[in-house]
Amino acid sequence: MTDREMLERVAADVMNEAGPASAIDVEDGATRTGLWDTIVELGWPLVGIPEDAGGAGGELNDLVTLLAGTGRYCAAVPLLGTALAYWVLASANQLSGPGDVAAAGPARPDEQLTAERAAGGWRLTGRLTRVPWARDADPLLVFAVDGGRQVVLSVPAGTAGVEVRHGRNVAGEPRDDIALNDVRLPIGAEIAEAPPYERVRERAALLQAAAIVGATEAAYELSREHAQTRQQFGRPLAAFQAVGHQIARMLGSVTMGKHAVSSAVETLATSGSSPVTSDRIAAARVVTGCEATAVARRAHQVHGAMGVTREHRLHLATRRLWSWRDEWYPQDWWADRLGARTLAGGAQACWDSVVS
Amino acid sequence: MTADTAGGTTEALRSLRREVRELIDAWRADGLFVPRCDNWLRGSDREFTAALAERGWIGMTWPKDLGGGDRSNTARLVVTEELLVAGAPVAAHWIADRQIGPAILRYGTRQLQEEFLPSIAAGRATFCLGMSETEAGSDLAAVRTNARRDDGGWRITGRKIWTSHAHGAEYAYVLARTDRTEQKHEGLTEFIVELAAPGVEISPILDLQGEHHFNEVVLDDVPVPDRWVIGEVGNGWNQVTEQLAFERGGPERMLSTYPLLAAAIDRTGNAAVDRFVRILLGELVARLHALRRLAYEVARTMDRGEAPVQMAALLKDQGTAFEQDVVEVARRVLDGEADPGGETVTGLLAGGVLAAPGVTIRGGTTEILRTIVARSVTTT
């Protein structure tokens, strides 16, 4: 068994049953799940951060495997946002041991927050929307702008002037809007030497793409099983060519997403930040978005009426596909960006990037 | 980063890619070929084939003592994908290089390997595929062409169709029935047939573009020596199934229309473009990144000595859909009409439009591929 297979096995053991249970509990309003407690205890949010920076060690690919697992097992846990925030802190040498839920924002395009020095500290204004699990985040890392420069401020839970409005995505997961009304923070709230927002956004998009791939696998596996067990006209659904083709096309979608993500992970891990890395991450985000839509549609078609109810667990996967395909920036935002870069660079540069 | 399993390095592959580009650029600059969609199927140019053979780029993965280069499938991917994106005329040797040589290597006797592989690698022996018949397209096992034993050899009679470049090739690979059994997948045998042999008649079939690459090949009691049986008599079905993995898993299943995509990108350029155009192109490029990675994994699987039947089928399904989508996106973003006489992007668009229907049919229809994949993951 490879290291990755072992990690997949661990993820399965931890989340196989607890994942779907967490999805249902969170949607019902649970503020905490046993699964998240376990995940924190196991140190998953610190995976991919070197030990000497306060992390749990391991590679980016390990974190990607765990995120894919959250999709595969339909888990409602703030792993992506927490891991992202801890990585920002570690990159700035400010990770002081494991904590609990954390988040970083903006998580959507065109949200500009303003920070200015005032009265021996910072003054922060603006609005963030749809930040995953912001209600529980401690800290919330806010990427703001002071004049021309990026300022990253760590906002502890309970800070005065921070107004959180609870919301949820189509999968029932917390997605909160935050109004920052003249929020005052001490000078030490700045995370100097934080990575540029563009890098944070790309890392988030890559982790999101990994989670989407996991969810496409969940929908595919459920469909494959259903087609072999459900019988109509005296035979399993899979015996009908039309249904078999739906299954085959779903596997094609899963495969495309997997390869797009692994290509991006490998490039980021070996080359760091680069134009090719940016292309590959955008590609992974776009491909997984497209395939999420295709897989959700086909999975429901294969499952028939049972699948469009809450009696069957397919909805735990497909509602995630519909939500996640446009989170950490909408799919079309990434396609637009990749298209613009392609046009600017020309066809030869485009091909060079593909084969780099 | 990654290593060519034949002992090369990423740097060796980069250097190989540069050399291929240099040759292509020189030929293009001298006006010796015009980039076209689908040129790997349409463009037969024996001189170009010879130039590639001279550089050791035909039969690259075969053993050196059989005329090959002992290189990995990954290295071959680098060469073939550069030829494809350039729309270079590689049709003459493509079939032999891609699947006949590998089939002979996998199943042929040493004698057969020595007889054919060096001359294929030298660009002297080219092949066409005698598989399809009027009654046996997707249902390849239904072939009626038969072979009977005769005086220590064989005599083959039948009619093959859609045989691209039979009119220029020296040899045909022929799948024929040697035994009538109840199971139609048994009793099939693979042969090499010399097209200059008595009893062979080739006539053209014009395609949608009015071009001649398809043929009908009539075989009337054509003599074939016994040593030109590939593998075992009666084992043809198992053997050809593996050959099809080689046929389906290559970059020509995603890059046939790339010359059009490249032209569309460069024609659209940096001018004020609207979001719609950027998104359409961005989606295509995103898929291209994923597809190329998949092609790379297929090559790596072949380097491990496996025949990636399922992965190749998935690649061809996804890749050929991409090829068709390239044409439709180009049509929508280009400010011009498809012009069969056009010399630049409008000509490429016309070629792409007329080539597009064939990509999801040839080499295994999309429907067959999906059935193969479905069967590999479900039991009913």
Image: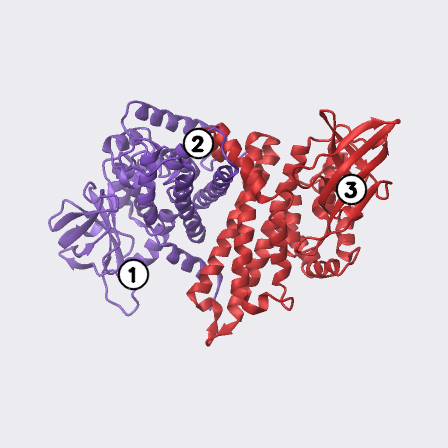
Chain colours: A red, B purple
Label 2 or label 1, whichever comes before in sequence order? 1
Q: Which residue is mark 2?
A: B268
Dot in front, 2 or 1: 2
Q: Which residue is mark 1?
A: B141
Dot 2 alpha-carbon crowd within 10 angstroms: few under 14, some 14 to 19, many 20 or more: many
* Chain at tag 1: B
Is residue A47 shown to the viewer in this render? yes
Residue B156, above or below A143: below
Q: Tell me where residue B36 sits by quadrant.
A: top left
Q: Amino acid at mark 1?
A: Ala
Left or right position of B173 against A34: left
Residue A273, above or below A312: above
> Do the residues at pointers 2 and 3 share their chain?
no
Label 2 – label 1 distance at C-alpha: 47 Å
Label 1 – label 3 distance at C-alpha: 68 Å
The foreground one among A255 and B328 is B328
Q: Secondary structure at mark 2?
A: helix
Q: Which residue is mark 3?
A: A179
User: Tag count in the figure?
Assistant: 3
* Chain at tag 2: B
Q: Secondary structure at mark 1?
A: helix
Q: Secondary structure at mark 3?
A: strand
